[in-house]
Amino acid sequence: MKNDYSFVALFEYAEDGINITFPDLPGCFSSAHKNNTEEALKNAKEALGLHLFGMESDGEQIPKPSYVFDFKLSPRQVPVLVDVFMPTIRASVKTSFVRKTVSLPAWLAAAADERHVNCSKVFQDALIALIK
């Protein structure tokens, strides 16, 4: 696995916003509000990182990127080179949180609240100890 990737994104400026596609990566796309190129760059970077992470996780081969000048563009399209640093992407995806609902007896929940106990932290610590 590589740590750095750069792929060409095509920003297509339309009446309703900016459509973002990655010709080398079918299924990798995003969008941004009308005339908001800064948002488009941010969204393109996020889409590319998550798409490549998914490909890595699935064991898919990541294609060699095309060159910026390889594309025939419409008048509303602009090629943009988007780069991502995968260690940051991998760490953020692997440390994302999911919500789990836990049922506690009312007296136990009240006692935890009185003592300002962080129930999420206690639950995490207990699960980590259990799976070690």
Image (spheres, grey):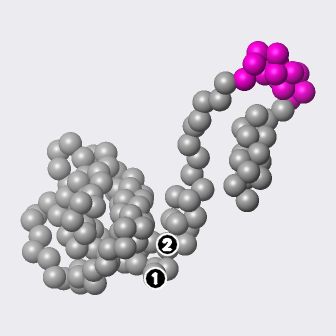
- Is there CB contact under 8 Å for labels 2 and 1? yes
The residue located at (58%, 46%) in the rendering is: 97
Q: Is 114 in the magenta? A: yes
Task: Give the mark nearer the N terminus: 2 vs 1.
Answer: 1
The residue located at (17%, 45%) in the rendering is: 15
Residue extending farthest to the top is 106
105 or 26: nearer the viewer? 105
| Whole-number angstrom distance, CA of label 2 to CA of label 1 | 8 Å
Above or below — where is 64 with respect to 26? below
Q: Is residue 60 left or right of residue 118?
A: left
Helix, strand or loop for disc 1? loop
The residue located at (24%, 84%) in the rendering is: 67
Q: Is residue 11 visible?
A: no
Which residue in the protein does label 2 denote?
Answer: 86
Helix, strand or loop for disc 2? helix
Which residue in the protein does label 1 denote?
Answer: 2
Which residues lie in the magenta part? 104-116
Q: Quadrant of the C terminus?
A: bottom right
Image coordinates for residue 27, horizontal then vertical, percent: 24, 60
